[in-house]
Amino acid sequence: MVDPNSVISYSDLKYESVLGLKVFNSRLEDIHLSQKNIINTISPTSYTMALEDPIFFNALKHSDILLLDGQYFALAPLLLNGKIVRKQSGTDCFYHVMNSANIHHWKVFLLGSSENTLSKIKRRMKVDYPYINVESFSPPFKKEFTIDDNELMISKINSINPDVLLVGMTAPKQEKWVFQNKDKINARIICSIGAVFDWYAGNQKQPEKFWVSIGLEWFIRTIRRPEILKRYPAVLKFFWILILNVLKVRRD
């Protein structure tokens, strides 16, 4: 059990311990991209899913950087610890890492999505980030990968030894895959960024900065993609778990 009132500090980075996870509470610019880092994100939906999936929970728990992505999850450290943790989305992480990759002429590997979407991403990256070397692979669309599937994906990645591996296979599949195969992957920075692939490719419209700035990113996304309503029971469950923790009826 993790003490919800403790703050964990690693080197010069700050982490807030909340609901059994250590959530990153420094700036993206403070992350040491010259070191190996597995970067994931946490939201009310993913947290609720992880409570019913031990592998997913362990993947989040053992992230080097766990970004708070989901406005409502910020209530947990605020109400439990009296701490404000900044929201930094997978999209924010993507742009930060890609800008660094461009500056340093790094190699980037894209894993996930369809060949069509990957082609769109690479075409745009040639314009936005002309100094990177980008390769990609579209894995088979299936619920569970076979041993052969995993070996092929790892082989494709390791063939170029990328500085950055971006995984876009949706949660929890992407986080679990990275967690289970991290020791075999020759990549320094591994980011699970899910929907960012579709946004960057132009398949889906990304919420404008206005909606993000006023905390209503979730609202405009729901208007544009009503299927997101299916996630709301998980969000309500998160609030219930949070209330029980605040009342000290439960300690996660």
Image (cartoon, rainbow, N blue to C red):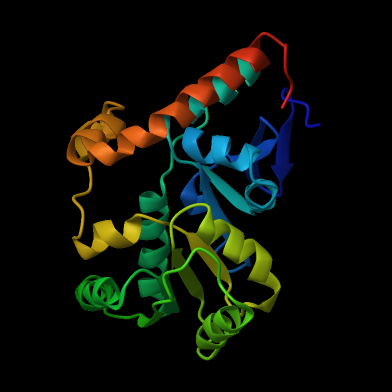
Q: Is residue 134 shown above or below 53?
A: below
Where residue 170 sits in the image (x, y, percent)?
A: 43, 56
Q: Position of residue 188 (x, y in %)?
A: 58, 72
Asked whether 56 or 166 is in front, the reply is: 56
Residue 182 point in image, percent of width and height? 65, 69
- Residue 31 appears in the picture as rendered: no
The residue lying toward the viewer, choosing from 232 and 18, is 232
The residue shown at (64%, 37%) is 51
Q: Nearer the viewer, residue 182 or 249?
A: 249
Which residue is painted at 54% across and 86% down in the image?
152
Query: Hey, which residue is sitting farthest bottom in the picture?
Result: 159
Residue at the limit of the structure toward the right, as seen here:
1
Image quadrant where residue 158 sits: bottom right
Find the residue positioned furthest to the top: 247
Left or right of 197? Residue 161 is: right
Q: Is residue 136 above or below residue 166?
A: below
Q: Quadrant of the C terminus?
A: top right
Residue 125 found in image quarter: bottom left
Q: Quadrant of the N terminus?
A: top right
Q: Is residue 74 visible?
A: yes
Q: Is residue 151 left or right of residue 99?
A: right
Q: How many marks?
A: 0
Identify the residue at image location x=41%, y=45%. 89
Q: Is residue 171 above or below residue 14?
A: below
Residue 2 sits in quarter: top right
Q: Residue at x 44, y 27 (%)?
A: 233
Residue 116, horizontal then vertical, whole percent: 24, 75
